[in-house]
Amino acid sequence: MKRFSAQYVITNSGPPLKRAVITADDNGTIVNIEDTKGNLEETHSLEFYNGILIPGFVNCHCHTELSHMKGSIAQKSSLGGFIEKVRTNRDNNIENIDNAISAADNEMLKEGVILCADICNTSSSFKTKKESRISYFSLLEVFGIDPERAGHRMDEIIKVAETAKEMDLPFSFVPHSVYSLSLPLFRLLRAKNENNTVTSIHFMETEGEKQFLENHSGPLMTSYQHSGLVPVRLETVKNHIDAVLNEITLNGNLILVHNTFIDKGTIRSLRKRENLFWCICPNSNIYIENKIPPLDLLIEEGCEIVIGTDSLASNSRLSIIEELKTLQFKFPSLSIEELVRWATFNGAKALGKENRYGRIEPGKMPGLLLLQNVDLINMKLLPDSFVTRLV
């Protein structure tokens, strides 16, 4: 048994507790929470810290299999340019992919991630996931705008799924984005993932998505043309709302990732879809488009917000605390309690794992992080705030 206390404890089950004592067994299961009302007595074997105890982080959007591409794509290249570079550079340094994925996993573990939704186009990350202390949910991603090759695209990802099954790794089939699937591929995918518990899709990440869907023009079309990927016949969904409500399974949770160019009308139209989560990856959005989502609009509209890091191809670190610090700087009115909830309980809920992660409660195994160098008076993150993993 280990006993921990700090100036504050954010449990996600009520307001922050002042100098509460958390008891955890050797497996990391929370055994007891003692609310001292701030009157903590010095006790043998109690570890006290000048900071805030919080649950382990949940990374709701990552691409570990792109970790070998760190630093290979220039910043602020726009999404079309970024995608083009991923296509042309993805096989560079491929001999280092296993080591890069393992290093990424170790980085996330050190940075306090306990649960991660990871996008997969191949099985290259599976060995690391099988051995990791992080619990992964693999989102097997499908894309392709050629209607004639829709069946081939599904066959490719089904082979990846067979490997995941053999290794007993949980997974779902998911679409890459609204603009990167032909309509026939969307419908083949829906037939395959009708019973998903978790689905995700890159969503309204760039302004050019609407232009491409409306008339097959703009920077995304240019990117496809440069890569020689424009088929004889293009058949895509009408718009983002139609994709979510009619072409993606309505079962389970749906995580909309990025939302950099989301608008009020789209948010309100999508309320027909239950179990919807909005994933923010601010440092990746800045890296690619030099823009972050309208977080104040998402909050105003009551959206359930979760946090992701995206990949090392579009980010310098896989650190949830760095994402939260960026949000704190851009939106100063946010409280630590709110930010932590998005990055812990909301994420666990989005992945259907809230019974185990996301809250510091007896019987759960949420991990335990120490958040330090924070403004404890105003409950704000500071530029040099950091986390240390305790459990």
Image (cartoon, grey):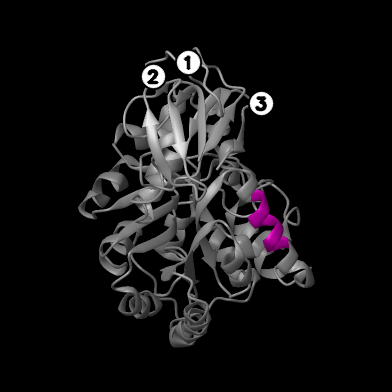
Tag of residue 41: 1
- Image quadrant for the C terminus? top right
The amino acid on which the numbered mark 1 sits, given as a three-letter code, is Glu
Earlier-in-chain disc, 2 versus 3: 2
In this view, the mark in front (2 or 3): 2
Tag of residue 244: none
**Disc 1 packing (10 Å; few <14; some 14–19; many ≥20):** few
Q: Is mark 2 on a helix, strand or loop?
A: loop
- Give the side of residue 86 with respect to residue 16, left or right: right
Q: What element carries label 3?
A: loop
What whole-number distance in Å separates the C-alpha atoms at marks 2 and 3?
29 Å
Residue found at x 58% / y 75%: 122
- Labelled pair 2, 1 in contact (Cβ < 8 Å): yes
Question: In the displayed structure, would residue 259 be above or below residue 232?
Answer: above
Tag of residue 36: 2
Q: Is mark 1 on a helix, strand or loop?
A: loop
What whole-number distance in Å separates the C-alpha atoms at marks 3 and 1?
30 Å
103 magenta-colored: yes
Q: Mark 3 points at which residue?
A: 384
Residue found at x 62% / y 76%: 228
The percent coordinates of residue 95 (x first, y second) are 78, 72
Of 164 and 332, nearer the camera is 164
Earlier-in-chain disc, 3 versus 1: 1
Specify start and end residues of the magenta stretch as a single range. 100-107
Please identify the quarter of the rendering in which residue 306 is found.
top left
